[in-house]
Image (spheres, rainbow, N blue to C red):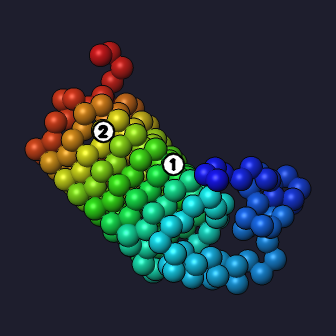
Amino acid sequence: MNMYSHIKCSEENCNFFALNENEKCLKHIENRDEKIKSISMKLQKEDMIRNCNNSTIILDSINLKDKMIIVANFSNSTFTNIDFTGSSLLLSLFQYSTFKSCKFNETTIKYTNFAGSTFSNCEFIDSNIVNSNFNGIFAQNSSFNDSDLYYSTFTSSRLENITYIECNLKKTDFYKSKRNNVSFKYSNYEEAFFNRDR
Ligand SMILES: [Zn+2]
């Protein structure tokens, strides 16, 4: 089966989805720290990460290289020093999360949602990032160099010290983005969207 579980956390007024095989979300589960530890171990061990609700997880300094991450929910989470090099992230949810010093190099990212997240010192180099959602992100000191960003969207994002060098920006959407020291050197930025009159 290849879909998200839509069972809500049993805590009153909580809108997060319950962890797999649990009544509560990761935020409200008893023994939260232990649970995070065991999920973290599991993520490192398994090649395929799918159909899981891991919202609000906190991951620090682990290796998630060469993983297949598909239909996985990691919204409202914190990632520090995580290496996703060589992984595929498909149909997955990472919105409203915080990424510090994370590597997404040589990745394939499709139909994945990073909306509203913050990024600092992150790398998305030499990657295939298509149809993915970076709307409303706040990104600093990060690089998307040598990547294909076809049909990905950065609408209403805030971008500071970001490089998009030698990228395919065909139909990449930067509408209403705020850009400070952003380089599009050697990229086809004329094929990207910066406004709505074409
Ligand atoms: Zn909850």
Q: Please tell me which residue is depicted at 19% across the width and 53% down the height of the picture.
A: 146
Circle on res. 150: 2
Tell me where residue 10 appears, x and y as whole percent.
Answer: 87, 59
Q: Please tell me which residue is depicted at 44% across the width and 56% down the height of the picture.
A: 89
**For residue 79, above or below residue 152:** below
Q: Label 1 vs label 2: CA separation?
A: 16 Å
Q: Residue furthest top?
A: 197
Number of callouts? 2
**Residue 52 makes an appearance in the image:** yes
Q: Earlier in the sequence, mark 1 or mark 2?
A: 1
Rendered-image quadrant of the C terminus: top left
Q: Could you tell me the amino acid type at mark 2? A: Tyr
Q: Is residue 122 left or right of residue 113?
A: left
Which of these two is toward me, 142 or 88?
88
Mark 2, Cα crowd under 10 Å, few <14 / some 14-19 / many 20+, is: many
Q: Quadrant of residue 14?
A: bottom right
> Label 1, on which residue?
91
**For residue 52, above or below residue 4:** below
Tell me where residue 144 appears, x and y as whole percent.
Answer: 27, 54
Q: Is residue 186 left or right of residue 127?
A: left
Instruction: Identify the element where label 2 is drawn.
Output: loop
Check if mark 1's residue and mark 2's residue have beta carbons within 8 Å. Answer: no
Q: Residue furthest front?
A: 1
Q: Could you tell me the amino acid type at mark 1? A: Leu
Instruction: Identify the element where label 1 is drawn.
Output: loop
